[in-house]
Image (cartoon, grey):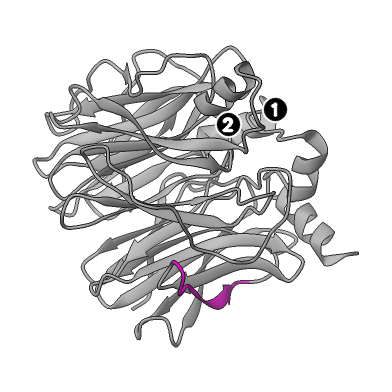
Amino acid sequence: MHRTLRFALVLGFLGLVSPIRAAETVHAHGGKSAEAQAQAELGALAAFDARGTLWAAHKVSGHIAVSRSEDRGTSWLNPVLVTPAPEPTDTGADARPKIALGPGGEIYVTWTKPLGKPYTGEIKFARSLDGGRTFSTPTIVHQDRQVITHRFDALTVNSQGQVIVAWIDKRDLVAAVAAKGPPYRGAAVYFAVSDDRGATFRGDYKLADHSCECCRIALVNHGDGSVTALWRHIFEPNLRDHALARFYPDGRAGPVTRASFEDWRIDACPHHGPALAEDAKGNLHAVWLSASPQSQGVFYGRKLGDKTESLRRIGGEAAAHADIAIAGSRIVIAWKEFDGEQTRLRATDSKDGGEHWREFDLTSTAGPSDHPRVLTRGNAAYVFWNTRDQPLSVTEVPQ
């Protein structure tokens, strides 16, 4: 079997939209199949606060909910419901509820709610200012209220305490079609900013045109309040590699720079976004997927931009949905990988800036699972992984 096809079939078995199937079905994202809905119910994200409490945003009986753990995920207290009634969430493979924590103990949550037309959505937001006991009435982040794509939200709190939400948006595509102008490639990345702990948002600010339509956006904060975003981009004519740009809470956006160079030519969305981290020296480190004929698999790179160093392939042929974080002097990457019978959770780390690596098999599941997330606290690193068989599990990466 041709390697590209075999790789695609493995991704399909994992519950993802394969590059080949995506091409055949013309961006078959946002489907409402039972498998996709089950995957959406497992979508979850977690973060440590300054005291070491672990907070997780996830789904409970159709509600968006937040749970907390005082023992690094060994046990969880009863969840607090964020949405007053059950509501659907986006079933895209890179969509999940997001959580971010403010400097004053604030808890912020975003998610994507699908609308009445295919592939459409709106970005919802709620906050808790009382330590997670109650949450505000959910609001919509963006000012644009067309029934179009506003999906695949990314949430962060910058170094100044401002709440920033970025998302994939198709208003420019819709406008180009209405104007009968030149074809518009893909979608765009927009962002909004709150200066008042999520009470209101201003924007919508455009970061970049021509993003891929269904891949998550990775965000990293800097000390001056600015944020760097990394996303899958559509370079002319149909190269779906990655781009990055720095943007600012006043709405300014810097130039778009190409960040990966596999030349993956595909007229479809891989449903597989990148992850990004910054070390103490200001160097950017990232992981991403490519299935180009010359470069297939998950890759790690550093010094992103014109001097990107693609240093290492991560895992085997079935490696998928890697995440990366910096824990003190360690670079830590986690991913999941199907071995023919089970999905294995694996990790690797480097203590010398990415030159040498150790690998670990952490755990596995025979059932469906969400994508792993690397969490850090000091020099310790943990992998948060929500699976059907072990909900909200947390596994430490050996030091």
Pointer 1 residue: 33
In depth, the one of 367 and 280 nearer the eye is 280
Residue at 76%, 34% in the rendered image: 26
Whether 336 is drawn above or below 13: the answer is: below
| Residue 288 sits inside the magenta stretch | no
Whether 139 is drawn above or below 280: the answer is: above
Residue at 77%, 54% in the rendered image: 8
Pointer 2 residue: 91
* Amino acid type assigned to the residue bearing label 1 in the image: Ser
Q: Is residue 249 left or right of residue 333?
A: left
Secondary structure under tag 2 reads loop
| Real-space CA distance between mark 2 and mark 1, rounded to the nearest whole angstrom | 9 Å
| Residue 313 sits inside the magenta stretch | yes
Other residues around mark 1 within 10 Å, as few (<14) / some (14–19) / many (≥20): few
Q: Is residue 243 left or right of residue 76?
A: right
Other residues around mark 2 within 10 Å, as few (<14) / some (14–19) / many (≥20): many
Magenta extent: 305-315
Asked where in the image residue 329 lies, by quadrant, the reply is bottom left
Earlier sequence position, callout 2 versus callout 1: 1
Secondary structure under tag 1 reads loop
The image shows residue 222 at horizontal and vertical percentages of: 22, 57
